Amino acid sequence: MSIDIASFTPGVSLTGGLVIGTAAAVLVFFNGRTAGISGILGGLLRAPPKNVGWRIAFIAGLIGAPLLESLLGEPIALQIQAGWIEILIAGFLVGIGTRYANGCTAGHGVCGISRGSIRSLVATATFMVSGLLTVLISRHLLGG
């Protein structure tokens, strides 16, 4: 295994992690809510929606921040090595997993573990092991 030094960006990654952690802490301290996008979006889709304002603001920030960054900085060139069918299947499986795990990777990994939730620790470990096995099988055993 080797690290692609050209793509190795610890400073930017650390900054991004600090911003995500700060946003999660602010949401918990000022609103008493966990920053899991599946719960935030799911709260908007339920009838009647609860606490609509902060949910819309949070989602607008998720969409608006990358758009603003692309206007102010150098746009990031995305390289996705999958077709639409694979992306749709993966998205569908993530959606099912999110329902079964009662939350998404962000909610469990960032917010749940920091609160000491055993359920979040198990869910995050399951996400990580599943990802590791998927890469191992698809890239190294099947040669994809």
Image (cartoon, helix red, strand yellow):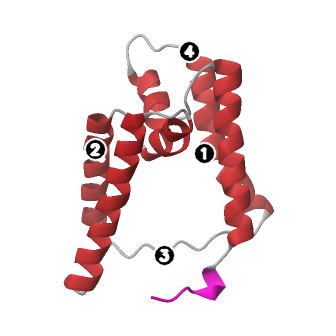
* Pointers 1 and 2 in contact (C-beta within 8 Å): no
Looking at the image, residue 69 sits to the left or right of residue 63; the answer is right
Task: Classify mark 3: helix, strand or loop.
Answer: loop
Query: Label 4 belongs to which residue?
Result: 51
Q: Examine the rendering and report whether any part of residue 144 can be seen.
A: no
**Could you say which is closer to the camera, residue 62 or residue 118?**
118
Label whose residue precedes the other's in the sequence (1 or 4): 4
Quadrant where the N terminus is found in the figure: bottom left
Q: Residue at x 26, y 65 (%)?
A: 86
The three-letter code of the residue at mark 2 reads Gly
The three-letter code of the residue at mark 4 reads Asn
Pair 1/2: label in front: 2
Query: Label 2 belongs to which residue?
Result: 97
Label whose residue precedes the other's in the sequence (4 or 2): 4
**Looking at this rendering, what residue extends furthest in the left direction?**
142
Residue 42: percent from left, percent from top: 41, 27
Q: Which residues are magenta?
A: 1-7
Label whose residue precedes the other's in the sequence (3 or 2): 3
Report how far apart the C-alphas of labels 3 and 1 lie in the structure: 19 Å
Report how far apart the C-alphas of labels 4 and 2 lie in the structure: 25 Å
Pair 4/2: label in front: 2
Residue 21: percent from left, percent from top: 66, 44
